[in-house]
């Protein structure tokens, strides 16, 4: 732009430029807090990964004490060799982690050190934009940024090379490209006008607040630990021929009885499946008794059958004994009573989902009448239609309008008479309205990067037992940018980005900035009942 000639106006313009620069340099406390939150999460993840790696070493050592492995010299040598390589991975990770922590401490010292009065150990000048820039890029001595990258690249190659290329000669390879490509250490940076050469140090640490630089280094510590864990898993696979699995041993057991039915008619067969809860294949000498008699066992499960007799409540008593795989001691589970009922003939219609019929979906029901064979049942339907489904006496009910539906059930008895068991009345309701979601959220805050990769608005039906899908058919979009007019767009599809999105909508979504407020309103969707309905709005503030 041209500069004004009038001195007063020139001074005003210069003051505005200075103010703009100051605002650009001011890092808000919200952003600094966000860095702290992310850093805490990364550190917790790093602790979890370290625990897994420690457990892997323990598992290797335990395997070397296993009698089966000791008796197999070839297997023993494999496990021993892979344990040694895993321990080398720990040494490499420890050395790399010490270097990264040293870089962190240099930046912290440059930013005033740790505040002794801070309960959470925060940096004195956590918003310092110069500390990381000086240490990593502009230092008079060795610049730590290129040094850190070189060490990380060397670590990545070295730790991946610990995984042997073959399965027999278990020694480190010169280079293992296959494993190296799987490691999470990545050194790409986004190209920008300021960083035209894609310099890694500049892209990560130039004008980054101290707390942000610490978060970046902690992220690399996490990547280093993750790389170590991946290499250990590969070594485990080399030693045992399979990926490492965490074996869970159950230590508490109880008897479970699963009857085919708890309510029987005279003459019907009672069948029950009986097993020890939390059963695993290491349990030895398993015995299950029903009414004092042992039952045949297959795969840890015993089956008991008897013919129902009498009327009313009946009881069977179940007990078990087994050898505990953890200590080899024989243990028993005391006898427990399990009850079932023998009743008289009566008819029922049971809904498989809810006590209502919904418009536009298949409502599954089961018709039954005690003492009446399946082929002898009949029904009469009012305000609904029944279609036969797979299974005995199973039907799908379809309804079209709110109100009430009636089903009258009748059946032919064994003596040839036809008996009407009654008329059953049910409510007919519309499917509830879904709610709109974007990125699984109902609103609040969202990052610009997260929003820009969202394909569409989705209609989600909560707390509904049927598998029902709604499709968003239209919506209106509005955005309020800082120091800009309110902009709007509309769409007759659900899409926000991609080839199916309306261009004006996609342009807004892909160009949002921090502080923008974006409104998705007048969202409409259609479900299986073919009725288009408004489902509300979703509003966001772009927070990073």
Image: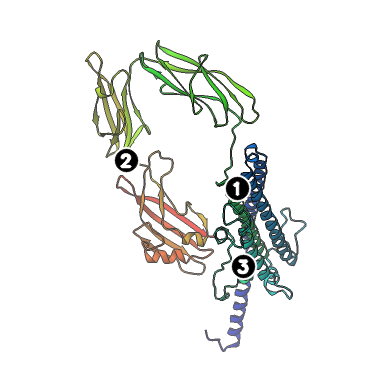
CA distance for labels 2 and 1: 54 Å
Give the SS element for disc 2.
loop
Vertical placement of residue 260 versus 465, above or below: above
Q: Which mark is residue 204?
A: 3
Give the SS element for disc 1.
helix
Q: Quadrant of residue 329?
A: top right
Q: Nearer the viewer, residue 326 or 7?
A: 326
Point out residue 35 in the picture as x, y percentages from the top left corner: 63, 59
In the displayed structure image, the side of residue 42 where residue 459 appears, left or right:
left
Q: Which residue is mark 2?
A: 361
Q: Nearer the viewer, residue 432 or 56?
A: 56
Q: Quadrant of residue 6?
A: bottom right
Q: Mark 2 or mark 1: name the one nearer the start of the chain.
A: 1
> Residue at horizontal 52%, vertical 14%?
292
Vertical placement of residue 367 versus 112, above or below: above
Q: Which mark is residue 239?
A: 1
């Amino acid at each position: 732009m041209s500069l004004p000639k009038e001195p007063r106006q020139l001074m005003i313009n210069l003051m505005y430029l200075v103010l703009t620069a100051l605002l650009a340099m001011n890092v808000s406390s919200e952003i600094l807090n966000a860095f702290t939150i992310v850093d805490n999460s990364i550190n917790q993840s790093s602790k979890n990964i370290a625990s897994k790696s420690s457990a892997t070493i323990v598992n290797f050592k335990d395997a070397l004490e296993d009698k089966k492995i000791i008796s197999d010299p070839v297997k023993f040598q494999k496990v021993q060799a892979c344990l040694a390589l895993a321990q080398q991975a720990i040494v490499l990770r420890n050395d790399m982690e010490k270097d990264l922590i040293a870089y962190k401490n240099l930046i912290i010292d440059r930013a005033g050190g740790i505040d002794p009065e801070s309960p959470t150990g925060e940096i004195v000048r956590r918003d310092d934009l110069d500390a990381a820039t000086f240490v990593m890029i502009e230092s008079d001595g060795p610049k730590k940024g290129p040094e850190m990258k070189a060490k990380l690249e060397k670590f990545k190659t070295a730790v991946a090379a610990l995984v042997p290329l073959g399965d027999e000669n278990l020694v480190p390879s010169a280079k293992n490209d296959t494993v190296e490509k799987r490691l999470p250490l990545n050194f790409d940076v986004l190209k920008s006008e300021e960083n035209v050469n894609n310099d890694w140090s500049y892209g990560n640490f130039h004008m980054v607040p101290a707390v942000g630089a610490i978060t970046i280094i902690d992220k690399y510590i996490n990547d280093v630990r993750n790389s170590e864990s991946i290499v250990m898993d590969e070594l485990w696979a080399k030693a045992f021929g399979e990926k490492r699995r965490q074996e869970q041993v159950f230590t508490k057991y109880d008897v479970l009885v699963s009857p085919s039915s708890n309510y029987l008619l005279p003459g019907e067969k009672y069948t029950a499946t009986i097993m020890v809860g939390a059963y695993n294949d290491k349990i030895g000498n398993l015995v299950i008794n029903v009414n004092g008699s042992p039952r045949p066992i297959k795969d840890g499960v015993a089956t008991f059958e008897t013919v129902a007799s009498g009327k009313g409540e009946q009881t069977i008593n179940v007990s078990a004994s087994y050898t505990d795989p953890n200590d080899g001691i024989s243990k028993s589970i005391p006898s427990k009573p399990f009850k079932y009922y023998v009743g008289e003939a009566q008819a029922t219609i049971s809904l498989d989902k809810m006590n209502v019929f919904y418009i536009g979906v298949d409502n599954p029901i089961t018709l039954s009448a005690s003492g009446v064979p399946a082929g002898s049942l009949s029904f009469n339907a009012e305000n609904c239609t029944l279609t036969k489904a797979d299974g005995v006496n199973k039907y799908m009910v379809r309804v079209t309008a709110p109100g009430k539906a009636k089903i009258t059930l009748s059946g032919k008895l064994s003596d040839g008479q036809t008996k009407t068991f009654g008329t059953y009345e049910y409510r007919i309701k519309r499917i509830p309205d879904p709610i709109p979601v974007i990125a699984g959220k109902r609103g609040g805050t969202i990052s610009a990067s997260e929003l820009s990769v969202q394909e569409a608005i989705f209609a989600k039906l909560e707390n509904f037992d049927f598998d029902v899908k709604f499709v968003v058919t239209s919506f209106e979009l509005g955005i309020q940018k800082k120091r800009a007019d309110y902009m709007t767009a509309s769409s007759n599809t659900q899409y926000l980005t991609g080839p199916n999105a309306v261009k004006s909508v996609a342009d807004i979504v892909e160009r949002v900035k921090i502080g923008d407020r974006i409104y998705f309103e007048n969202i409409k969707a259609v479900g299986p009942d073919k009725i288009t309905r408004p489902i509300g709005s979703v509003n966001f503030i772009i927070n990073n």
